[in-house]
Each structure stands twice: as structure tokens, then as C-alpha cells.
Amino acid sequence: MEVLMKKLSPLKRLVNRRQLLLSGLALAVLSPRGVLAREHTIKPVAQPAKPVSNGKFIVMIDPGHGGIDSGAVGEEGSMEKHVVLEIAGTIRQLLNDHPHIEVRLTRDSDHFIPLYQRVEIASQHGANLFMSIHADGYTSPEAHGASVFALSNRGATSAMARYLSERENAADDVAGLKVQEKDHYLQQILFDLVQTNTIKNSLTLGKHVLDKIRPVHHLHSQHTEQAAFAVLKSPSIPSVLVETSFITNPAEEKLLGSAVFRHKIATAITAGIVNYYNESAIHNRRIS
């Protein structure tokens, strides 16, 4: 048996090395450094030096849109970019005293950040979880309720998921940014090899968030939907996009304008994050 283990040891190191290599390749293909812009582009927002995590579970909250990108606009003129920044700030405040979780934001003011740079910010901070907060619009003002989305590399799970992912992925168009298509075959292989477990964890996170939103707000979809959201394409960080409501629905625009409702939805999202962290901590203890 000892001889067998000696033979297997180099193989184990080789497998681990291969996994690291694949992760690095995925980051190279999918990171913002692989994004090309037109000659006239927006200068990337300078990010502060990465704070020390002190061993805490890092949650990166991404308030959608910002700056010249207002996001969806309600009938009364409410802008998605302002509403989601308020909700994100409340989530950070609610988790401020948690002994094991630290929240950081991709933006804490009204400025524009390209989609792929948001993914890179999470990676630079060593985030354990990424959550993009939205309050989107739809062609019909009757659309209502909250939804949670995870990444899919095999097509959208519903027409609404496809519509919203295409809408969100077009956010950079307002800034004149253009993403260069990479070799689709290579990209697909890397996703399959590296992201399977990440997507699985993202779906688990989505379920925890939906379970906590369900008692306090109507759900547009009862389960975590999937689509090819550009902002969720981290190879290794569990990532979800939360549509807190439809700002193009007059009734929900009024709700989103209420500090009470924003706090209620932020509290539900926070509880989902804590439940996901607790489950992850238990799992990690079992395998350690």
C-alpha cells in the first residue's frame, strides 16, 4: 500500500496543477483584460488597494449600472442605478457586525463600471461570493416580482431569463464599449472544466436567497433561473444576479421608492447570504 501511495502522489500533484492551469486559462479568456474597447472609451475606475480579509468570508455586492448608465427607468422617473445602490448599502450595513462575513461593494457612488471589470474587482478582492443587485424593466408594465439568476453556458432557462440577460449584457453599449468574441470552442471547454462546481454553488446560493425573499415579496420565478449574464462569468466565485423587483411596474416602482421596502428586501437577501455561508462553513468542516 505504501508503494502504491508513492506512485499516486505525483499523479495527485499533477491533477492539482492541471486544475490550477485550467483556472488560470479561464481567467485569461474571461477576464476584462480580454475585453477590447473602441478607441474612444471610458477610462476604468481606479480601484483602491485590496483590503486584508483577516480570514473573513468576503461578499462582493455589485449595485448594477451607475453613472451614464441609469439602468431601467420607472414611469415616475425612478432610476434603477440609485435604487440598487441604496439596497446594496443596506446589505453591507446589516452584515457589518457579522463576525465572519465582510461585505465590499463594486461601487459605492454613482459612477459607471464596465461589466467585466465588475467580475475582476471581485477576483482582485478574493471574494467568496458575488451578488449583482438590480431592479430591472420589461416591455410590459405588468411584469412584477423578484427573481434570482445564475450563469448558464447552455442557454437560458426561460424567455424572461433570455430577455433580461440580453438587456443586462447590453449595459456597456451606453459607454461605447465592445466586447470582442473569443474562440467559442475554447471558451466552452474551459467553462465545462472549471465552472461546473461554481454554477452548482451559485444555484445553491440562489435558492437560499429566494427562500428568504418568498415570505416578504412576490416572486416572479419560484426557482433560480439561468442565462448567460456577462457579470456572472467568474470561473471560481459563486455568483448570482438578484432582480429585486420590476421598476417598470408602477406599483413596484412605488415599493422601491420606499425605504421600508428596500430595507425589507435587503434584510431578506442578507438572510439568504448568511444561510449560504453557514451551509458552506459546515461543508468545509466536514471535508477538512
Image (cartoon, grey):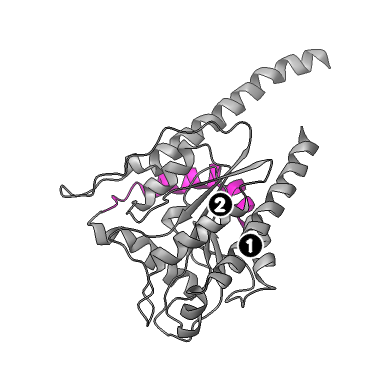
Of labels 2 and 1, earlier in sequence is 2
Disc ID at residue 232: none
Residue type for callout 2: Arg
Q: Position of residue 264 (x, y in %)?
A: 61, 68
Residue type for callout 1: Thr
The region drawn magenta spans 178-203
Q: Position of residue 202 (x, y in %)?
A: 60, 54
- Secondary structure that dominates the magenta span: helix
The answer to whether residue 173 is visible is yes
Residue 8 appears in which quarter of the rendering? top right
- Residue 46 versus residue 247 in the image, above or below: above
Residue appearing at x 37%, y 39% in the figure: 47
Q: What quarter of the picture does the C terminus occupy?
A: top right
Magenta residue check for 192: yes
The answer to whether residue 165 is visible is no
Magenta residue check for 249: no
Residue appearing at x 27%, y 60% in the figure: 68
Q: Which residue is mark 2?
A: 92
Q: Secondary structure at mark 1?
A: helix
Q: Which residue is mark 1?
A: 267
Q: Position of residue 118 (x, y in %)?
A: 41, 48
Left or right: where 122 falls relative to 275: left
- Residue 69 versus residue 163 in the image, above or below: above
Disc 2 to disc 1, C-alpha distance? 10 Å
